[in-house]
Image (cartoon, rainbow, N blue to C red):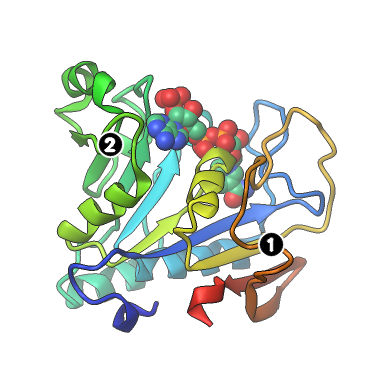
Amino acid sequence: MPTDRTPAGTRPYVLISAAISLDGYLDDTSNQRLRLSNPDDFDRVDAVRADCDAILVGATTIRRDNPRLLIASPTRRAHRAAQGRPEHPTKITLTTKGLDPSLAFFTTAGDKIVYCPQPALPALEKELADVADVTTTGNPLDLGLILDDLAGRGIRTLMVEGGGTIHTQFLTQDLVDEIHLAIAPFFVGEPGAPRFVGHGTFPHNPARRMHIAEVRQIGDIALVRYLAAHRR
Ligand SMILES: NC(=O)c1ccc[n+]([C@@H]2O[C@H](COP(=O)([O-])OP(=O)(O)OC[C@H]3O[C@@H](n4cnc5c(N)ncnc54)[C@H](OP(=O)(O)O)[C@@H]3O)[C@@H](O)[C@H]2O)c1
């Protein structure tokens, strides 16, 4: 992780990490979590998480998948501890409607930060203040100010792990430095399923292309790492 490019006090380096189907879906419409990746790729994601200071996911992902967002590998946790870092990255989410405090996001290890639009703050503080730091950057939430706030908390590398609504906002606002796309060798084909991104005006377009930093085969997964044009 290029922490050399993110001196203390500046906005964190932002990395989007996602697994998608060949037709660009993050999930299907069933109640079960769709397994897009394979064990070796899950381990790669664990290593990337272990290099990051914080992980951000949207509230729908937390409600639907109930993720713990922890470092699985004891060796990686021990390595972080030896560096004087917390064993697990800080966990961050964005919500307006609020979340159940009994979800694994809140009940498992790691610091938690919940950002919500200003009008939702009183209710969400009441609901979640015991399990997370609940705060705002205005109405609507300003993602740039969130990155500034995270910089002030010492976060220098932020891994954004979905879902599509979150990806779309970070990408259309040109706040992303790197994308890791793990492409699974099958199609979902369901119009109601969540896609990697929604519609929007993306700063990376045919006139401003991203750069490929790496293409790697991980079993039946194709990993592509893209750098934003400004990171070339
Ligand atoms: N394949 C993968 O790598 C991967 C990774 C992650 C997720 N997923 C999948 O992605 C799907 C979820 O994606 P999604 O696009 O539907 O939802 P999402 O991005 O996970 O979450 C969207 C929700 O986050 C909150 N939010 C987002 N931006 C906000 C803002 N600016 N201000 C306030 N709140 C904000 C809102 O919560 P409120 O409803 O509380 O207002 C919004 O409804 C799930 O099916 C999950 O399994 C797949």
Give the labeled residue for mark 2.
Answer: 114
The answer to whether the beta carbon of the residue marked 2 is less than 8 Å from any atom of ligand 1 is no
The answer to whether the beta carbon of the residue marked 1 is less than 8 Å from any atom of ligand 1 is no
Can residue 69 be seen? no
Residue 205 tag number: 1
Residue 141: image x %, image y %?
A: 34, 36
Residue 167: image x %, image y %?
A: 54, 48
Find residue 22 and report its image quarter.
bottom right
- Residue type at numbered disc 1: Asn
Q: Residue at x 29, y 36 (%)?
A: 115
Task: Label 1, secondary structure: give it.
Answer: loop
- Work out whether mark 2 precedes mark 1 in sequence or the reverse, and give the earlier one: 2
Q: Closer to us: mark 2 or mark 1?
A: 1
- Residue type at numbered disc 2: Val
Pointer 2: residues within 10 angstroms few (<14), some, or many (20+)? many
Q: Nearer the viewer, residue 205 or 75?
A: 205
Can residue 159 be seen? yes
Q: Residue at x 35, y 66 (%)?
A: 52
Q: Residue at x 50, y 45 (%)?
A: 169
- Marks 2 & 1, CB-CB < 8 Å contact: no
Task: Label 2, secondary structure: give it.
Answer: strand
Q: Looking at the picture, does residue 86 appear above or below residue 134?
A: below
Residue 40: image x %, image y %?
A: 61, 68
Find residue 222 and report its image quarter.
bottom right
Looking at the image, residue 206 sits to the left or right of residue 186; the answer is: left
Q: Residue at x 38, y 80 (%)?
A: 2
Q: CA distance from mark 2 to mark 1?
A: 32 Å
Residue 7: image x %, image y %?
A: 23, 77
Looking at the image, residue 93 sits to the left or right of residue 130; the answer is: right
Looking at the image, residue 20 sits to the left or right of residue 70; the answer is: right
Looking at the rendered image, the quarter that the N terminus falls into is bottom left
Q: Looking at the picture, does residue 126 appear above or below residue 142?
A: above
